[in-house]
Amino acid sequence: MPADDTGARSKLRWRPRSLSGYALLTLVGVSALGHAIASFSRSTIVFLPDEYLNSELSRSFSSSGLPLVRGSQVFFPSLLQPILTAPCWLFGSVEAGFRASMVLDSIVMSLAALPVYWLGRRLGLSAWFAFAASALALVTPSMLYSSWLLGEAIAYPLFLAGFAMGVLALSGDKRWLIPALIVFALASFARIQLLVLPLAFALATALMASRERRFRRFLSQRRYLIGAGFLLAVVALVVPAGALGFYSGIRHVDLAPGGIAIHFGTQMIGLLFACSWIIVPGALIGLGLAIFRPSSRIELSFACSASIVTLGLLLQASFFGVVTIPQERYVFYCAPILALSLALLIERGWPLRRAHALLVLPILILVAVLPLSTYAAGDRLFQSSFLYSTFQLERSFGVGNAALLVAIVVSVLALATIALPFRGRAGGAWIFVLAIAFAVPVLAISTNFDLSNGSSVLRALTQRDKSWIDKRIDANHPGGGRAALLEGYGTRTSALTMLFWNRSVDRAALLPDSNRPDVLPWPDLHIGGDGSLSVAGKPLTGPLVIDESMHTITLRGAERAGRSRSFALWLPLGRPRIALYASGFAAGWLSVRDVLALWPTTAGGRLAGFVTFRVKTTKETGPVTLTLSSPGQPKRLIRLTPGESRPLRVAVCSNGPWRAKIDANHGAIIASRLVSSKASAPVWREDASACAQAH
C-alpha cells in the first residue's frame, strides 16, 4: 500500500511539474518578446555616457576587433556585453544595429528565470513556488535595463546561473565547481561589480563550515572554491589602478562608520524597490531559519550563500557610485534570491509569524517618511527603475499626490502581508501574487517613461533625421568622408547622442573654454596663427561638426552645410580655418564671461576692422554692466537698464590673432543657462580706419 501510494503521488505530481515547465518557457518567451517589442519604440539611448560607451566598444569590436572609442583604445573591464552584441552592428545602419542589440539584450536578460527555477527545484520547492520566484525575477522593475545598451542584460542571467551552480558546489556536488568558477568570471566580465560573487562564496564557505562544526574538513574539501574567491579578490586589490579603466578610483572609499551605516540603510531601500517591498521581511526570516534550522545541506548552502552575496552587494552599493541614493541597479540581482528564500519559508508552514509582522512594520513607517521626490530627480533616476516610474507619476499627478499614491499602495500591500501568513501556503502564494501585481505596473510605467524620455531627447537635440550629418557628408563625399567634432560647452546628452547616431563623426577635440562630456579622451584643439586647426599635430582638413551651444564660430575655407539645435556641419572648400570665434555667444544670449577672437588669413597677417553686435537686457536679467577688455584700448563699461538695447562696435587692429573679453557683473539662470543679456551674433568686417580708432 505505501508503495502504491508513493507511485500515485509521483504520477499525480508529474503533470503539474510539466505544466510549470511549459509555463516557465512561456514566461521567458513572453518576457523576451515584450521587451523586444518595446525596444522598437525606443527612440535613442538615454543613459549617458554608459550606453554610448558600450555601443562604441561594440561597434569597434565588430569593425576592428579592438576596444576603441573615437580612435583611442580604452581600458574597460566590463567588455562582455560589447563583445556579444558586436555582430549586431554588421547589419549596416546605426538604426539596425541599435535595434538588433536591444533585441539580443532583451532575449538574454529574460533567460534569468531559468536558473531561478532550476535552483528552486533543487532546493525542494514545489514547481509552482519555483515558478513564482522565476516570475518575480522577470517582473522586477530593473528588467527595464533589458533594452538598454548596458552590461546588466548579460550580467543578470550569468549572476543567477553562477549563484545556482555555486550553491550546488558548496553543498557538496563537485560537478558544479568548475562551471561555477567559469560563470563567476563571465559575470564579472559582464559587470565588474560582480567580482563580489566569488569572494562572497569564499566567505559563505567559511560560514557554512562553522555552522556544520566540521571546519577543517569542510574547508579542505572546498579549498578550490575558497582559493579562487580570495585569489580574485587579491588580484582586484593589487592590480594597477590603470588596468581598471573607469573604475580606477574603486579603492578610494569613505570608511567612516557613520557614513557607511547611512549609505547601507539607503541601499536597503533600493533592495526594497527591486523586491516589490513586501518580499524582504519573509525572505530574511527564511534565510535565518535555513541557517539555524536547515532541512538539508543544500538549503544551508543556499542560505549561507544568499546571505553573504546580498550583504556583499549592499556593501558595494554603499561604497561606490551615488551612495546617497538607493542604487537599485546595483542590488536588484538579489530579488530572485530573496524570492526563493520566501518560498522556503512558505514551504515550512510560515513559522515565526509575529516576527514577520514586526519586520513588516518598518516598511509602513519608511514609506510614510521616504523622500521619494528628492531621490527621483536629475541623473539619480537612472540608478533605480522604481524611481523612474515614481518620476513619471510625479509628472502626471504632482509630487505630493504621487508620493501619497505610492505610500497608500505599499501600505496596503504591507498590511496584507501581515494577515496572509495565517492562511499558510495559500496565503504565501497570495504574497507572490501581490508582489508580481505590484511589480508589473511599476515596470510598465518606467518603460513608458523611458520611451517618452528618449523621444523628448531627440526633439530637443536634433533635426528630424537623427543621422543627418552622416547623410549630408555621404552626399558630398561618396567615398565616405570622416568628420571631426569640435566640442564646446554643450551638454553631455547632446554631444554623445549626436556621436551615437552619426558614425562619420569619428574624431573629437575640445574647443577653448569648453567641457568634457565624458571621461574618455578629448584632446585639445590647436588653432594656428592663421586659424588652421590641428589635433595632436595632425591637421583637420575634412568636414567639421561644431558645437554651437555656447559658441559662435565662422570658418574660412569651408561652407556651412546644415545645422541642428546644437551643432553645425561645415564642409571643406580647401583647408578649414577659423576666422571668428565667440565663446559665450549662443542662442541669442551672452554669458557672464565671453571671449571674442579673430585670426588673419596668414600667420602674422594684418587684422583691421570692426566686430559689431547688439546687446539687450530683459526683465529677467535686470540691469547689467558689461566690461569690454580689448588689446591696446582702455576698458569700456557698458551699462544697460532693463529693456535697453544698444549696438556695440569693437575696433580691431592687430598683427596676428586678436582676442578680447567681455565680463558681466551678474547673471541669471534662463533656460538652464547662466546668462547676462541678449546678444546678436557678432559680425566681422574689414576696415582700415579701425586702426586709427583702436589707437
Image (cartoon, rainbow, N blue to C red):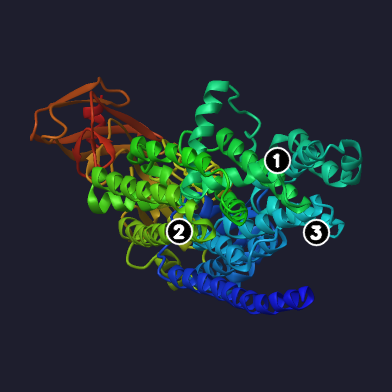
- Residue 75, horizontal then vertical, whole percent: 67, 46
Residue furthest out toward the front: 1
Q: Residue at x 50, y 63 (%)?
A: 147
Q: List the residue tagged with mark 2.
A: 45
Is tag 1's residue or tag 2's residue first in the polypeptide sequence?
2
In the image, residue 423 above or below residue 679: below
Q: Residues within 10 Å of mark 2 (few under 14, many from 20)?
A: many
Label 1 secondary element: helix
In the image, 552: left or right of 47?
left
For marks 2 and 3, give the CA distance: 34 Å
Q: Residue at x 75, y 48 (%)?
A: 301
Is tag 3's residue or tag 1's residue first in the polypeptide sequence?
3
Q: Residue at x 68, y 46 (%)?
A: 290
Q: Residues within 10 Å of mark 3 (few under 14, many from 20)?
A: some
Label 2 secondary element: loop
Q: Nearer the viewer, mark 3 or mark 1?
A: 1
Label total for image? 3
Q: List the residue tagged with mark 1.
A: 292
